[in-house]
Image (cartoon, grey):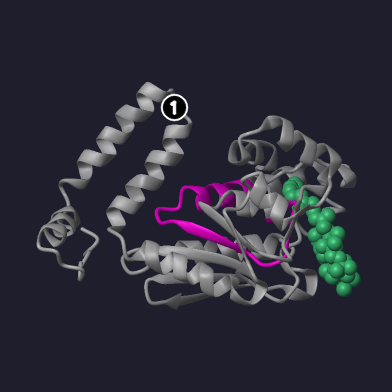
Amino acid sequence: MSFVQFEAKDQVGLITINRPEALNALNRAVLSELDHVLDQVELESIRCLVITGAGEKAFIAGADVAEMCCMSEEESTVFSETGNQLFSKIETFPIPVIAAINGYALGGGNELALSCDIRICSENAIFGQPEAGLGITPGFGGTQRLARVIGSTSKAKEILFTCRNIKAEEAKEIGLVSEIYPRESLLDEALKMAARIASQAPIAIRQIKRAVNEGLDMPIHEALRHEITLFSACFATDDQKEGMQAFLEKRKDKEFKNR
Ligand code: CO8
């Protein structure tokens, strides 16, 4: 395990893409290690993940161009499928995932961030989908998730067609990120947000993630029905009883047991 590090900080898991010499570019080894790290997350104790990049310059500067440049059509299909499966795993991961974008998030880097639940970034972050300039389309979900995340096909196509860089302020303006922080405090802020999420009732948080994600792919009447199912399932949990009892007893010290 050298390209992807995992550190448990109480109930928060910090994943660092650690290939700073190539601006954390995603090659096959990085994708495979990240997949393995996700499989190892102890879901009984870890309640939120933060993903960031090693070094001062980049979150992830894209898929590894040096590795991709000689791929055949068949090899590129496998590479794209591997990345897509991994990013879908992040998107549907049972607990929330925050992308702490600490610099360049280009191509596959932006696509990884798009598969996370929440994106926050540093003031020096730069986003973009430069693929068309390399003679390819995005291949890890960018043609699909960018428009869905920012809610505008016009803006998404403009970004995808022009391959221009987007600075942090514009990323916030278009809804690509929810907050911008100074570079030095980004990780602390991400961990603070994650700890706050981790302090809520974990089954409720998982149900909320499912309700939002799965509901977006349904007609509204089905999505609302889905919310009813996920909502009512919470009433079979000890944590619902603890959360409401604590409120009624004016107790701050809630103890959620994840059951
Ligand atoms: N792939 C491989 N190596 C990279 C990458 C990358 N994406 N990005 C940076 N590096 C390497 C550089 O080659 C360089 O290595 P070396 O020191 O050995 O020359 C090192 O990282 C440092 O980079 P720079 O010297 O270029 O640093 P700068 O600060 O001058 O520039 C940039 C930073 C602007 C980020 C620049 O490195 C750059 O433009 N990088 C490429 C960005 C890019 O085009 N990303 C998109 C790649 S395509 C993609 O992600 C498609 C995803 C879906 C694929 C599905 C396929 C099947």
Q: Quadrant of residue 122?
A: bottom right
Q: Nearer the viewer, residue 135 or 96?
A: 96
- Residue that appears at 44% across and 65% down: 194
Question: Which quarter of the frame holds ligand 1?
Answer: bottom right
Residue 166 pos. (x, y %): 77, 51
- Residue that appears at 45% across and 40% down: 213
Q: Quadrant of residue 174?
A: top right
Residue 41 pos. (x, y %): 43, 66
Q: Is residue 38 above or below residue 240?
A: below
Question: Left or right: 23 with respect to 144?
Answer: right
Q: Residues within 10 Å of mark 1 (few under 14, many from 20)?
A: few
Question: In the rendered picture of this protein, how many numbered marks are placed on residues?
Answer: 1
Q: Is residue 187 above or below residue 245?
A: below
Q: Nearer the viewer, residue 205 or 120?
A: 120
Question: Left or right: 72 with respect to 155?
Answer: right
State the SS at label 1.
loop
- Residue that appears at 20% across and 39% down: 232
Residue 216 pos. (x, y %): 47, 33
Magenta region, residue range: 82-109
- Residue that appears at 66% across and 41% down: 146
Question: Left or right: 94 with respect to 178?
Answer: left
Residue 153 visible in the picture: yes
The residue type indicated by label 1 comes to Met
Q: Nearer the viewer, residue 117 or 35?
A: 117
Q: Quadrant of residue 145?
A: top right
State the quadrant of the N terminus.
bottom right
Q: Disc 1 designates what residue?
A: 218
Question: Left or right: 82 with respect to 40?
Answer: right
State the quadrant of the C terminus.
bottom left
